Image (cartoon, rainbow, N blue to C red):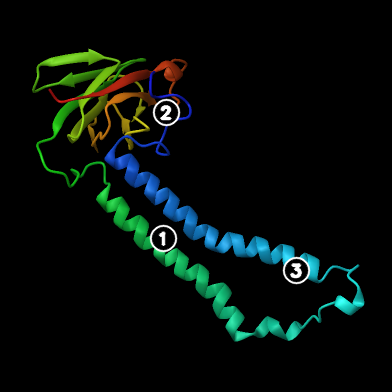
Amino acid sequence: FAGAGSTDMGVLHPKGLVAEEQRRLLFDSIALMLSVVIPVIVLSIDFALRYRADRPKRKAHHYEPDLADNVLLEVVWWGVPAVIVLILSVLLWTSTQRLDPYRPLDVPGKPLVVEVVALRWNWLFIYPEQHIASLNHLELPVNRQVEFLITADAPMSSFMIPQLGGQIYAMAGMRTKLHLYPTSIGNYLGLNTQFNGLGFSEMRFRTEVVDEK
């Protein structure tokens, strides 16, 4: 699909509001974790060089085992991870609530309703307000919220458009929801990410985001 090559797929190249939020959350989490990982790597290299056995005695550093009970060091190596876990918890909790797939996004305008049915091995899209349907082709208006009502008439599948964000299961006898908001015109890959049989890898569809007119 044009615009959905391997270099453009996923939340690292977002074309929707949800995917942009997911990418920001991913980078924020990585940055917080690197604040611990990088110092540990640097100190590990420093210790290996500083206390190596073949280091000249005139340059050797004195080993002080009493530091094992140093209160300041204990506070640092327990306190810093605890603070990072607390920050991550707040960040993930607020983002999870804000990006709940069942919850409408905080954007103005009436959502476009699209009913999604996972078949074997195709995707059926029904536009109830427009009285039309399509197979393996999803057309959405740019800068308008879309409410997906998802179910299945076959084994459980997973509905996902990586560049628009979100992933949710399609299950027979049940209806799940997903809210997305495309922000860029183009063609994007949609697919089934659930291994559910020999045809799952070909269960793909084209998502075309166009001007609402």
Give the quadrant of the C terminus: top left
30 or 193, which is in the foreground? 30
Q: Secondary structure at mark 2?
A: loop
Q: Which mark is residue 47?
A: 3
Q: Secondary structure at mark 1?
A: helix
Give x and y (percent) for residue 36: 56, 63
Q: Secondary structure at mark 3?
A: helix
Please say if 64 is above or below 184: below
Q: Quadrant of residue 191?
A: top left
Q: Nearer the viewer, mark 1 or mark 3?
A: 3
Q: Is residue 77 left or right of residue 20?
A: right
Please state which amino acid type lies under the numbered disc 2.
Gln
Which residue is denoted by mark 2 in the rendering? Answer: 194
Give x and y (percent) for residue 28: 42, 55
Which residue is denoted by mark 1 in the rendering? Answer: 88
Distance from label 3 to label 2 (Cα)? 46 Å
Who comes first in sequence, dot 1 or dot 3? 3
Q: Nearer the viewer, mark 1 or mark 2?
A: 1
